[in-house]
Image: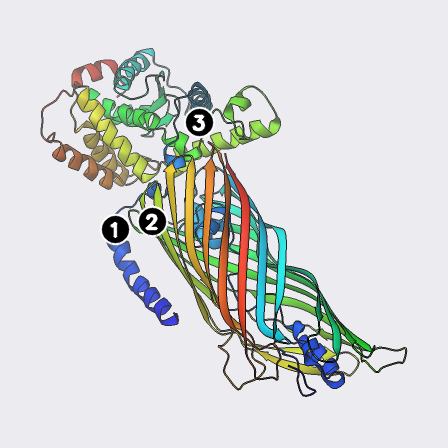
Amino acid sequence: MNRLFKLISSILFLTFPVFYMTVSHASDDFRKRAPQVEETFTEDDDIRAEIVFGRELAARIIGKYGIYKNNDITQYVNMLGKGLSQYTNRPELEFRFAVLDTDSINAFAAPGGYIFITKGALKAIEDEAELAGVLAHEIAHVSERHIVKELDIKGKDESTVANIGRIIGGNTEFLRGVFTQMVDEAADILFEKGFKKQDEIDADRIATLIITTAGYDPSALSRYLKKISSDEKEGKTIGSTHPLFSERIEKIDTLLVDNNLAGKKYEIVKERFHENVRLR
Amino acid sequence: MSGSGNKICMFRAWQYVLYNLFFILIGYSFLLFTSVSFADEYHYNNIIIGDRASGMGGAYTAISDDPSGLYYNPAGIAFSFGRSLSGGAQAYHMVQKEYKDVLGGRGWNRRSSEVLPNYFGIILPFGNGKMGFSFAVPDAILEDQAQTFYNIQQGIERYIININDSDKTYNFGPSYGIKINERLALGTTLYMHYRTRNYINRHFINFDDGRYQWANAYKWLTESGLKPVFGLMWTPADRWSIGTTFSKIYIFDTDLRAQATYKSPDYTNTTIDYSIWKSHDKKEFPFVTTLGIAYFPSDRILFSTDISHYTSAPYTLRLNNIDAGSYIPENVSQESVVNMAIGAEYYPNAGIALRGGLYTNMANTPELISGKTYQPEHIDMYGASLSVSSFSRLSSLTVGGNYAYGKGKAQIIGDDPSIQDAVMQNLTVFVSAAFSY
């Protein structure tokens, strides 16, 4: 038995660096068991909890950056974003879009359908297809409930102290404290830690499919990422919450090739974008 | 079985108390064999901790993504889902040993049973990782038995053994686990190790001619130490997980006191012989390395295996006789041990989980050799476990149990080279609940 233990240990010790170097990516989602995977969020209470939570998080985002007050641009971004949101699997949500008053290049999504893009990102975007790609990426974070799943936000369960349904209705300081802590964690994901890499890759994939279905250039998001990744190298962008551009770009490009979309001429709608977004 | 030359088996220093007192005065060595330690210091895997882990035979080092993981592999809690998790278990724990052909050809049974808080753990996000606190009872004995034997030997009308032994080991302390990247997590637990034992052993013998004799032994032990655990959880490929942990218990304080009193059959005076013994010598524990591998083919099934290596841990214990100012050194040999466990988990639907496992609990004593004396018992144990969990949206209830059985050899009468067959059984039934929010 001792020899067996030493043999197994030695094999693992020797193979560790080989595995480590060769395996490019491994999501930890496979660790989820059936009860965690098969949770559904179709009940009204869950949706209400998601929206209430997202609204609180949206307030944090607005509080941090402020709203860029330009009705024309806001209306344009909303029109485009609401159109794209029709291609998601969340008809129960009303998506809302706003521009943040900061020159940093970024975009944020809060549960419940609250989508933000920064003024800096709009300056970096060159056409409507790219804007559609960025908005669709954030819409995908909402539609796939990335924050909801990460923080296990639920609206109806008699056994939980963090029952947001109960928190919404008033209740104790303790329950409100739990809610505030959860919003803090969500803000931490948006501003500091970022989404999980697999979540980002999934959002890119879904965004590319959405804009393609909507008739925009399928490579628009890839183009945008290439641009801001080069800006990042020059220190022009923040981008800290959307890491690993090269890997994301590679995945999108592979998706385009696999679906025979690479090089296809779709609409980029440059003129309309510049007519509505006058920031330079 | 009897004879003036027979001595007591002495594999723990406190037993010398009995030996020194009794050997001089008693010619019936069977009076003394019950001093054999019942606390299961001869095995390392006595109570399987946690709800999910218990059902899987303890093969949990490469999973460890719930509060049980605080005990098995703190690195695993970095992969826990949900914002906060807590879990606790209550267990009925029973240990039974049977020594064959001991009392006039008859067997002798010892049995311990109790309901104990088996485990509690909570995990919370902290910084970029997860922190937790857990409490575990990895070993516990509550033996409370009164036995009367008749006509075990010519000249003896009745022999009574009363034993009350409460021996519990507690581990409690904080943990922290953090992902270094999406494939690798590290974690550590710093457990406080605390053991307390109160032992009373009384023998009474009635001879056919009306004489009687008795002997009482008392023992109090407290043992405090630290048990640091370092863990690593690695995802080498999709659906595969490898976990490893390193741990060792370091004792920083031991307070052992023992007292024995005795009355011989022919003694008629009013004073009673007694001895008081003390020791502060620290027990040595093995360095434990555990390696676990888990495979998750789907979200409904997983397989896991653990292999644990315990180094040899010999040490010397000196029991000081307070009155005589002398001490008895005892060299305790604890051999290296390898334990293995395999487990599986299956979800027939999202509301039910079935788990099963097999595990070993090997003895850290050497195999008994014919012709030698003073040999500790050697019983390798093999166990199986089962559990079922029912899930609501944020909570789960688990009922399960594990049973281990082992056959081995013992030498109840220490200086008698005769070797007895021994059978040991270990049963734990538990109910646990877990919550997340």
Q: Residue at x 59, y 51 (%)?
A: B92
In the rendering, at what x and y percent does residue B185 appear? 40, 51
- Amino acid type of the residue that numbered disc 1 sits on in the rendered structure: Val
Q: Chain of mark 3?
A: A
Q: Quadrant of residue B279?
A: bottom right
Looking at the image, what colour scheme do you see?
rainbow
Distance from the alpha carbon under mark 3 to that under mark 2? 32 Å
Residue holding disc 3? A64
Instruction: Name the mark nearer the viewer: 3 or 2.
Output: 2
Q: Are marks 2 and 1 on the same chain?
A: no
Q: Are marks 3 and 2 in contact (CB under 8 Å)?
A: no
Say above or below: A118 vs B134: above
Q: Residue at x 37, y 22 (%)?
A: A101
The answer to which of B70 and B1 lies nearer the viewer is B1
Say above or below: B176 vs A109: below
Classify mark 2: helix, strand or loop. Answer: loop
Say above or below: B308 vs B130: below
Q: Chain of mark 1?
A: A
In the rendering, at what x and y percent does residue B10 appear? 63, 78
The answer to which of B370 and B273 lies nearer the viewer is B370
- Amino acid type of the residue that numbered disc 3 sits on in the rendered structure: Lys
Q: Are marks 2 and 1 in contact (CB under 8 Å)?
A: yes
Q: Chain of mark 2?
A: B
Q: Quadrant of residue B264?
A: bottom right
- Amino acid type of the residue that numbered disc 2 sits on in the rendered structure: Arg
Q: Which mark is residue A23?
A: 1
Q: Which mark is residue B183?
A: 2
